[in-house]
Image: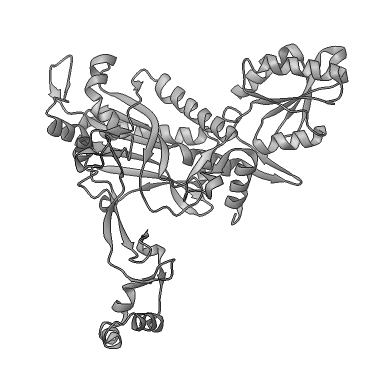
Amino acid sequence: MDNLMEKIVSLCKRRGFVYPGSEIYGGLANTWDYGPLGTELKNNIKQLWWKKFVQGKDDMVGIDTALIMNPKVWEASGHLTAGFADELVECRKCHKRFRQDQLENLGFSEIEEQLKRKGTINISVVMKSQGNEFRKKWRRCECGEIIEESPKKFNLMMKTFIGPAEETANIAFFRPETAQGMFVNFKNVLDTARKQIPFGIAQIGKAFRNEITPGNFIFRLREFEMMEIEYFIEEKDWKKHFEYWRKQMVDWIKELGVNVKKIHEIEIPEAERAHYSKRTIDFEYEFPFGQKELYGLAYRTDFDLKNHEKFSGQNLKYKDPETGEEFTPHVIEPTWGVDRSVLVILLEAYSEEKDRVVLKIPPKLAPYKAAVFPLLANKPQLVKLARKIYDDLRQKFYVDWDDRGNIGKRYYSQDEIGTPWCITVDFKSLEDETATIRDRDTMKQERVRIKDLSKVIKEKLKE
């Protein structure tokens, strides 16, 4: 498991799932670009989620809101005032910022030697009087500079400017979460979608956080994508709805093909919860680099709508159509990370079997549903028939064409990118209008009538 992440990163680059961002210019710290196959996998995850949680539910609607919002949104939400920040230490030499646990501890002698060189007066006396407490205050930056720990709060919002001049009045922020776009549109949705509580608003979109990133590939990014729901309820029913969405999230994890034994539901204590949350559960996964958060479920109470009503001066209450009673809805918020979903699927799917590498991605999520080969690329009659099959199938599924090298290498190449089935046209195909279809996981082959191939693949995708 120690080198599993290295293998995943290598495979992703080699096979076109994920590339280092801005690579031809030396990259940009912890930014990644999705390649052709990674984009397909990512889109398949989002489409499955949208179908399951939005189109598949009559109490749900979807929206798509702006990345940059009026700065007052972030005042109301608490992102500018309620500690949406990390405590960081800044090096005065290179001006890089670090969390305290990312810096190297130093011994007394090393601190004394380097501080004497800086001309610090009576350093030995100070060290002796403060003892271990003195040593705890000093760390070494990665640039080699010895720095004193004096952590400060640095906001995680990504700042930008609206208009031609970089003036304070024009400061704006890229959204750090998708949730606020749904809250500020609550009244618009209520007026146009004709939904009654309980109902939800869903969104898939990018968010940005200028945080110190520890790497781990696409696990923690400054620019990331979220699938999120704000489910509006009556306060008295919050426990029932919270449990419903907890089960829904577990079902989703199973649908991705993730081993639920590697999932841990962690109840977040009050002192560690976000300022708006009355209850939060993190769904943590056993990553190769440790047990970390995959998804989250929070009970946000009525914090957001009340604050937006207060700051905007608009009535954001819900009026019960039967009783006429007005009240501020409470909210259950299930959140899924798209990038972390991609990573977990790759980790779960990766398998080494003797001389082949296989990505056992669930077929409905696999980038290609099938690949079509002519047995021999230099036989025009085989190529012609295989090409016709390929053209017919790609009207219904995303399929690949491969006529490179020998048939064995083609199979193994498709195994490595997770293609569930490979279809081969051989000389028998010319005689009886059948083709072989090979299963990725079992490597078993069967002959299927060419006219039935589409139906067979469709049925297999349902399994």
**Measuring 80% from the left and 35% from the top, which residue is drawn there?**
408
- Work out whether 267 lies above or below 250: below
Image coordinates for residue 96, horizontal then vertical, percent: 37, 60
Image coordinates for residue 43, horizontal then vertical, percent: 51, 29
Q: Which of the 4 image quarters holds residue 195?
A: top left
Q: Is residue 192 visible?
A: yes
Name the side, left or right, on which 168 lies relative to 217.
left
Quadrant occupied by the C terminus: top right
Name the side, left or right, on which 33 lies relative to 357.
left
Tally of numbered tags? 0
Image coordinates for residue 370, horizontal then vertical, percent: 68, 25
Image coordinates for residue 456, horizontal then vertical, percent: 68, 18
As rendered, which of 447 and 430 lies closer to the eye? 430
Q: Which of the 4 image quarters holds residue 95?
A: bottom left
As rendered, which of 37 and 31 lies closer to the eye? 31
Q: Residue furthest front?
A: 164
**Measuring 55% from the left and 39% from the top, which residue is drawn there?**
345
**Measuring 66% from the left and 44% from the top, which residue is drawn there?**
351
Quadrant occupied by the N terminus: bottom right
Name the side, left or right, on which 434 lies relative to 76.
right
Q: Is residue 441 visible?
A: no
Figure coloring: one colour
